[in-house]
Amino acid sequence: MELKSAMISKDFKKRPDSIRVKRKIVLPDCSLNEIDIVKNSSTGTLQGGYEAKVKEEYESNKLEAVVEGQNDSKKEVLKRKSTRIKSRKTRNLITKKIGELRSDNSVKTRSRKWTKIPDSGNESYAALPKRKHSAKIAFKKDTSPIDPIAQKVMQAAATSRKMLGAHVSVAGGLEQGFYNALSIGCRSFAFFVRNQRSWNSPPMKAEVVQAFRETAQKLKFPMDQIVVHGSYLINGGSCDMEILARARACMLDECKRCEQLGIIYYNIHPGSTAGKCTREECIKTIAATLNYVIDHTEYITILIETMAGQGNTIGGKFEELQQIINLVINKKRVGVCLDTCHIFAAGYDIRSEDRYKETFSEFENTIGLQYLRAFHINDSMGDLGSKLDRHANIGKGKLKLAAFRNLIADQRFDGLPMILETPEGDYAEEMIRLYHSLNSKPLKEYKKDIRSFFPPI
């Protein structure tokens, strides 16, 4: 009897060109009719080499033993033409064999965790995150590069020069941030370049950097509309030397990663006294941290974020940011990211036209509008001056839509990245609401499904 044999690699990895399901696989109609494996009759498992001289036959789900050679007690030859294989090792063997036989790589995946990126060829796949809100939506398989909801956002933004975007997920690869942003119509976006809640992170691989840069070039996405958010662990103003050393090392690592990717802006929370030093000492330490990072990098611009003034944090007053900037040696590489929720909670009102003008007039006189490089667009759960750092969805907090209407109408901020950091919700809907904030429609109409304002595409 002439028998076939098959091999399986122990380090078999899940890939898009292989069949992968949890419990069973379905063999496609191809030239693979019989698959041979070795089965040890004493243990009932495949042998270590996985070299088979076993055939399986598909008849009422039973195995038919056929004795071969002299080692009857150790090996048995089984024949079964089956379309359902339950053994994990057998399943892996089959998928490996199919991949070898099908040279055209046309075996389709049954898994929902892999999807083909449009217009990128058969070899370009990306792992998709779970869909929690629209910021994490990635391209679906076999769809156009522009999602219908993204087209609606683009229609709303047609007459605006505001660069609205959102903080997006980069699960599946840093380059996935571009697709997640474009899928909801973002003109700008932010992301974490590494784990934001861990001190240690492995260095970026060359292929990760290359994929990010190639995607940016392919999509022609402007790099000055990307803002990397710094780790939440960093306290550049700590008086504890051990904590300060770790904070500076982490900040420097993140800034170097930004430069590897070609990113211009890096946004960070200033720091906190932690109740262990004066605010003046903390401000000097923050400035020293910025000088240290700037000295050890080439071109990255560090954006200090306005804070709500909660607890011992620095940055709740414009004067504190101005003091930090004054102590930075290379002022061309420092700027400010203004968070609408934070400044409102810190006591700066922007709801009426008069209050809006007063607030930004104070910002210009204290810090200077030339340092304002980016915005975080958030409504506030806390009242004016509450020092409560709690973001709310646009139009559903204490700021209301009127405050954002003033901001969208201000032509001085055209071209600056405006990043949404609102809680779980629909970023696309909120961007449409912002773009339409200049309309005369009452606020109650915007509480309806915003997609109904546009005809289906």
Image (tube, helix red, strand yellow):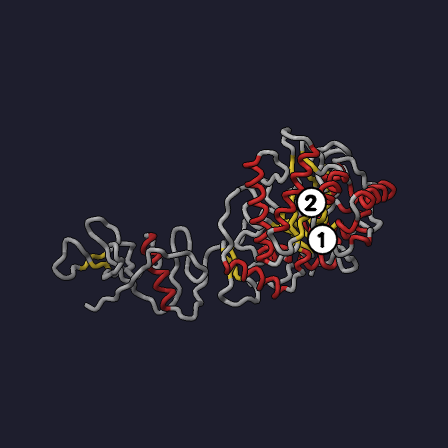
Residue 289 visible, this orientation: yes
Which of the two labelled residues, at mark 2 and mark 1, occupies the earlier sequence position? 2
Badge 2: few (under 14), some or many (20 or more) residues near its Cα, within 10 Å?
many
Residue 429 visible, this orientation: no
Badge 1: few (under 14), some or many (20 or more) residues near its Cα, within 10 Å?
few
Which of the image's four quarters has the C terminus? bottom right
Q: Is 100 left or right of 317, judged from the image as shown? A: left
Label placed on residue 332: 1
| Up/down of 208 relative to 229, above or below | below
Give the label, 2 or 1, closer to the camera: 1
Q: What kind of residue is marked 1?
A: Lys
The percent position of residue 393, horizontal first and vertical second, equals 70, 42
Question: Tag 1's secondary structure?
Answer: helix
Q: What kind of residue is marked 2?
A: Ile
In front here: 326 or 422?
326
The percent position of residue 90, horizontal first and vertical second, equals 32, 56
Label placed on residue 257: none
Q: Mark 2 points at which residue?
A: 304
Q: Is 407 left or right of 79, judged from the image as shown? A: right
Q: How many labels does the image show?
A: 2
